[in-house]
Image (tube, helix red, strand yellow):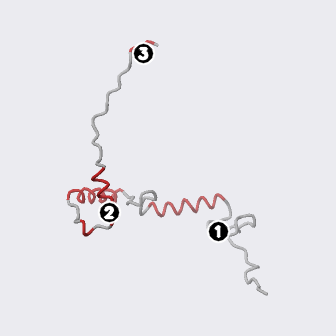
Amino acid sequence: MRTDKFAGFQLRCIMCPNFIPADRPKRAVTCSKECSQARKDYGRALQDRTECRYCERPSTPAERARYKRWRKFELKNPPPDAELSEAELAEREYRKANPRQKRGPKPKVTQHPEEDAE
């Protein structure tokens, strides 16, 4: 017969000193939804200090500026195909096939005289 050596222990929330209630899911590490949200926000803040959680690119202003300079340099001086991975080669081919559209001046908005009369 198996004995549970941890039957007498009560788990505490990792965000505050409260105990985890029995009605929380079995693997819960927080005592409430508020502590769970605070834990998620904390993790996101930690990640956002190093990289964007959406695109995984640098997130500080200095890193973004350095990244932009690097991209401009790469566009002017692309590495030879032998040094690129398959994903980078595929991205290069995609960019060649779908060049960025140049933006022109914004069209001026003209109001119709009929609308002004109303």
Is residue 22 positioned above or below 97 on the image? below
Q: Looking at the rendering, in which quadrant would you find the N terminus? A: bottom right
* Residue 92 appears left or right of 40: left
In this figure, which residue is indicated by the disc labeled 3? Answer: 116
The residue type indicated by label 1 comes to Val
Query: How far, Cα to Cα, is label 1 from label 2?
Result: 40 Å
Q: Which marked residue is nearer to the observer: mark 1 or mark 2?
A: 2
Give the residue at x 46% y 59%.
53
Q: Position of residue 76 (x, y in %)?
A: 20, 57
Q: What is the quadrant of residue 32 in the picture?
A: bottom right
Task: Farthest residue to the left: give it.
Answer: 77
Return the mark for residue 73. Answer: none
Q: Earlier in the sequence, mark 1 or mark 2?
A: 1
Q: Earlier in the sequence, mark 3 or mark 2?
A: 2
The residue type indicated by label 3 comes to Asp
Q: Are marks 1 and 2 in contact (CB under 8 Å)?
A: no
In this figure, which residue is indicated by the disc labeled 2? Answer: 88
Closest to the observer, 16 or 114? 114
* Residue 12 appears left or right of 108: right
Q: Position of residue 49 (x, y in %)?
A: 43, 62
Q: Earlier in the sequence, mark 3 or mark 1?
A: 1
Task: Farthest residue to the right: give it.
Answer: 1
Return the mark for residue 29. Answer: 1
Q: Residues within 10 Å of mark 2 (few under 14, many from 20)?
A: few
